Amino acid sequence: MDLLQITVIVMLLVLTIIVACVGVYLVFVLKELRETVKKANSVLDDVQDVTGAVSTPIATVAGIISGIADSLKAVKSVGGLFDNPKKGGK
């Protein structure tokens, strides 16, 4: 064999080893990425639970305040009927 063939064989072996190492490293990176995505999903689930726990009482308080405001309007309307004298009365 001449020098060119030996050089090509050595280069192919080196490139094959490098590609195999990159492939193994890529598998490790993808595995770590998968674990990171699972943790992020868990955090998002926890945030969703917390926001749900906070938003429900706030919505309830808003409904109570709205009901009180409507009740006060109704009381004022009924009170207005008794306060206004009829025309031509007393």
Image (cartoon, rainbow, N blue to C red):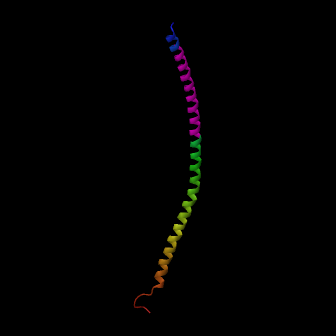
| Left or right of 37, for residue 86 | left
Q: Is residue 10 highlighted in magenta?
A: yes
Q: Nearer the viewer, residue 21 or 54?
A: 21
What residue is drawn where x is 56% and y is 20%? 17
From this view, report whether residue 28 is shown above or below residue 11. Answer: below
Q: Residue furthest front?
A: 3
Residue 26 at x, y = what percent?
55, 29
From this view, report whether residue 70 is shown above or below residue 88. Answer: above
Q: Report the magenta residues as a range.
A: 9-38
Q: Nearer the viewer, residue 61 or 35?
A: 35
Q: Residue furthest top?
A: 1
Q: Is residue 15 highlighted in magenta?
A: yes
Residue 10 at x, y = what percent?
54, 15
What residue is drawn where x is 57% and y is 28%? 25
From this view, report whether residue 16 is shown above or below residue 2. Answer: below
What residue is drawn where x is 56% and y is 57%? 56
Quarter of the view holding residue 57: bottom right
Residue 62 at x, y = what percent?
54, 64
Residue 87 at x, y = what percent?
40, 89
Is the magenta region chiefly helix, strand or loop? helix
